[in-house]
């Protein structure tokens, strides 16, 4: 979320078997995990271990889970978002506690949410708006369970709010709500999880800064929250405080919410984007905002996508990494600080497994082998 590295693009990858962790972009608070605060404009491995399972980028910090179920954090910690019981920044990964039962993690701007293998939800960090779901507005520097239920399936942290899906397909939200991003039909902040509607057909969701996107089990895309730049894909710029379907098609596979924009992949492998586009983060070859989904290029080989504040990363089905948008800190991994308005491949390797965009930094895991 400038002093930039010119180490050869992916030049350190020889001999790495994975799943290894790689980072690049801004490093003001150690969020790249390299043991320093030097920005990097090309991917560099974090340490030498090859035991990373998943990773999530916050505004100026990072959290990741290893294959043994341990949780690790590094970067900015002003609100306790690293979960270490203090507010001390870390420039290298440090384990959160000693437990080995973490299943997934998601970073918001300054707060962290995680699900354990028993389905319980845990939160820590900034809590001015109730985004930790604890029924109060007290910051937490160590993980605390949200309620006592163990039926959480997935979580996503946004800009001071949180959304999650339970195992029964219900959608729940809490935190900041000035634009209706909680989907409750109002703009009232919530400090505890509240269900969105009564339906049980939510499959996946992603929080942007102040807007939420979700896909239902039938493949339909729904959005709500802030819409200043068309990031809800509704063909207008009207904020929505309740979920509204985007178009009528039911072919959406995955979505990611960014700063004021959205990107998604359809079941045919095509990539689509809409919303704010000042830095080319929509990948359309221009800087024109879009209020309805428009396909990025014509290819059908996109596997996953992740949006940051104003830059986008994607992995294709062949394992190649592609980036576009804002690049002021080298977060596109291209070895420079030049913005891109169309997707450009990062290096030539085909071993990228997963990605997450932070504030102005990118984290990724490479696959085994």
Image (cartoon, rainbow, N blue to C red):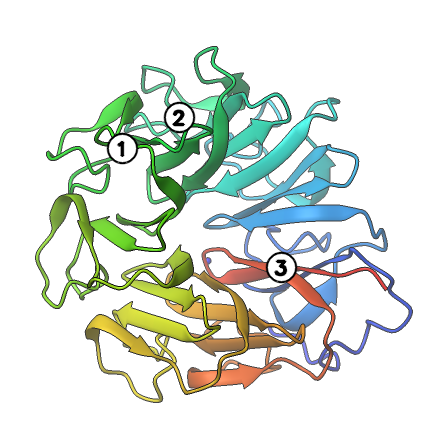
- Mark yes or no: residue 331 visible: no
* Res. 354 mark: 3
- Between marks 1 and 2, how big is the CA–CA gap? 24 Å
Q: Quadrant of residue 364?
A: bottom right
Q: Do the CB atoms of the residues marked 1 and 2 lie less than 8 Å apart?
A: no
Depth check, front residue: 340 or 232: 232
Q: Which residue is mark 2?
A: 132
Question: In the figure, is residue 35 to the left or right of 153?
Answer: right
Across and down, in percent, residue 179 comes to 15, 44
Depth check, front residue: 5 or 332: 332
- Between marks 3 and 2, how big is the CA–CA gap? 26 Å
Query: What is the residue that sits farthest to the top in this orientation?
Result: 148
Q: Quadrant of residue 238?
A: bottom left
Look at discs 1 and 2 and give the one toward the viewer. Answer: 1
Q: How many residues crowd mark 3 within 10 Å: few (<14), some (14–19), many (20+)? A: many
Across and down, in percent, residue 142 comes to 56, 22
- Mark yes or no: residue 22 visible: yes
Q: Earlier in the sequence, mark 1 or mark 2?
A: 2
* Res. 349 mark: none
Question: In the figure, is residue 286 to the left or right of 8?
Answer: left
Across and down, in percent, residue 255 comes to 40, 58
* Res. 199 mark: 1
On screen, 343 above or below 74?
below
Q: How many residues crowd mark 1 within 10 Å: few (<14), some (14–19), many (20+)? A: few
SS class, disc 1: loop
Look at discs 3 and 2 and give the one toward the viewer. Answer: 3
**Quadrant (top left, top right, bottom left, bottom right) of the C terminus:** bottom right
On screen, 306 above or below 10?
above
At 81% from the left edge and 54% from the top edge, which residue is drawn?
Answer: 47
Q: Earlier in the sequence, mark 1 or mark 3?
A: 1
At 13% from the left edge and 48% from the top edge, which residue is drawn?
Answer: 240
Q: Earlier in the sequence, mark 3 or mark 2?
A: 2
């Amino acid at each position: 979320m400038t002093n930039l590295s010119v180490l050869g693009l992916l030049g350190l990858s020889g001999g790495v078997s994975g799943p290894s962790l790689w980072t690049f972009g801004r490093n003001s608070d150690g969020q790249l995990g390299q043991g320093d605060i030097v920005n990097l404009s090309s991917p560099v491995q974090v340490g030498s271990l090859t035991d990373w399972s998943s990773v999530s980028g916050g505004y100026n910090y990072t959290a990741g889970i290893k294959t043994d179920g341990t949780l690790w954090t590094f970067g900015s910690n002003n609100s306790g978002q690293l979960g270490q019981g203090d507010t001390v920044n870390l420039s290298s990964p440090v384990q959160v506690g000693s437990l080995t039962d973490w299943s997934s993690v998601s970073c918001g701007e300054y707060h962290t949410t995680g699900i354990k293998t028993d389905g319980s939800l845990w939160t820590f960090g900034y809590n001015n708006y109730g985004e930790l779901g604890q029924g109060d507005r007290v910051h937490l520097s160590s993980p605390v369970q949200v309620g006592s239920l163990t039926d959480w399936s997935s979580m996503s942290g946004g800009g001071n709010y949180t959304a999650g899906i339970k195992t029964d397909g219900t959608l729940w939200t809490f935190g900041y709500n000035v634009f209706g991003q909680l989907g409750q039909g109002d703009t009232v902040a919530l400090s505890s999880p509240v269900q969105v509607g009564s339906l049980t057909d939510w499959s996946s969701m992603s929080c942007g800064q102040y807007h939420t996107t979700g896909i239902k089990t039938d493949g339909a895309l729904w959005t709500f929250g802030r819409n200043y730049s068309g990031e809800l894909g509704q063909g207008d710029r009207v904020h929505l405080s309740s979920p509204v379907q985007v178009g009528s098609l039911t072919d959406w596979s995955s979505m990611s919410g960014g700063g004021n924009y959205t990107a998604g992949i359809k079941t045919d492998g095509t990539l689509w984007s809409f919303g704010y586009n000042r830095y080319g983060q929509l990948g359309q070859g221009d800087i024109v905002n879009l209020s309805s989904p428009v396909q990025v290029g014509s290819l059908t080989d996109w596997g996953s996508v992740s949006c940051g504040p104003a830059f986008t990363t994607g992995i294709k089905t062949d394992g190649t990494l592609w980036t576009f948008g804002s690049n002021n800190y080298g977060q596109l991994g291209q070895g420079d600080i030049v913005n891109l308005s169309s997707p450009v491949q990062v290096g030539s390797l085909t071993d990228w497994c997963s990605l997450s965009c932070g504030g102005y930094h990118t984290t990724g895991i490479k696959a085994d082998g």
